[in-house]
Amino acid sequence: MNSIVDTHTHLESFHKKGLLSNALDAALNAGVARMITVGTDEKDWEVYARMAESRPGIIDYTVGIHPTSVDDNWESLAGGIRPYFERPHPPVALGEIGLDRFHLPKDPKEAEKKLQCQKDAFREQLEIAKSLAATVVIHSRGAFAECVEEIDRSGVDWSRVVFHCFSEGPGEMQQLLDRGGYGSFTGIITFKNAEPIRDAARLQGIDRLMIETDAPYLSPVPHRGKPNEMAYLRHTADFCQEMFGEDAESFARKTTENAYRVYGLKR
């Protein structure tokens, strides 16, 4: 079986339930040879750092403040990001960071206040990423244009920017391509009503394609609606392989090379 890389997962959920070992075994048996577990706030950063240290070459990690984790204490949290990149086993990216309009408060004034807080935290973390020349993992929900604007303004190297769980269409993908950025794709690409997302993936092309689970969320067909796990990346891979007309070996090689290049993974 050809090995593939899950470029975005959240292992803390498995860790908390005592299911991490089983989930990792299932992933490895499905050919998911490497995975990047993505930080959302300080509660998971250290957990992920230790996971990566104990399983080199299998687990890599990131640190960042997810927009829905941004609160009045975000500046203090942001101050804790840089030290991780000074460790012997540093993160492979800063993220996931960005903007999320979906989870804003219903009250318009409170929503505007929260969104401004998200933008302030996003800008600060982009500055940190720029100073570290780090790859950046972007969370954008209902805020694609605003995220692009903020990244443009920051001066971050677009060739190191990944819009994870890309759920837009070819028009938005073209904006990323024009700048040199990337979109990575979850199990959503297998959904019946996801043709615009598939069009975006085709536009980006196999030579820039990366796939992810975002586990425990967004299970691909045939597990849609159930908790996701890293092993299910195989379904997304098989679907995309057929969509691009690639054989299994070529698809695995190309997507793995893309992940290693963008995230600077060490062999």
Image: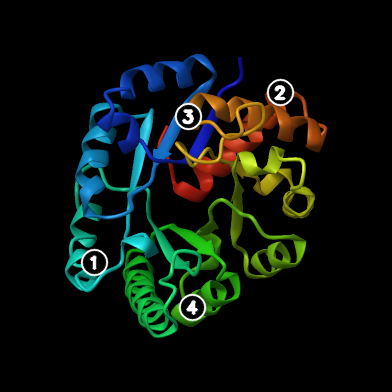
Q: Amino acid at mark 4?
A: Glu
Badge 1 is on which residue? 78
Q: Are marks 3 and 2 in contact (CB under 8 Å)?
A: no
Residue 25 image-quadrant placement: top left
- Please name the residue shown 53% across and 78% down the image: 152
Name the spot of residue 227 as percent of width and height, x first: 48, 32
The colour scheme used here is rainbow
Q: Does dot 1 land on a helix, a strand or a loop?
A: helix
Q: How far is disc 3 from disc 2 in space, using C-alphas?
A: 21 Å
Q: Are marks 1 and 2 in contact (CB under 8 Å)?
A: no
Badge 2 is on which residue? 248
Would residue 24 appear left or right of 84 to someone viewing this image?
Answer: right
Disc 3 vs disc 2: which is toward the camera? 3
Name the spot of residue 51 as percent of width and height, x first: 26, 33
Badge 4 is on which residue? 150
Q: Amino acid at mark 3?
A: Glu
Q: Residues within 10 Å of mark 4 (few under 14, many from 20)?
A: some
Disc 3 vs disc 1: which is toward the camera? 3
Which label number is shown at residue 47?
none
Q: How far is disc 2 from disc 4 in space, using C-alphas?
A: 38 Å
Name the spot of residue 265 as percent of width and height, x first: 43, 41
- Name which of mark 4 and mark 1 comes first in the sequence: 1
- Name which of mark 3 and mark 2 comes first in the sequence: 3
Badge 3 is on which residue? 229
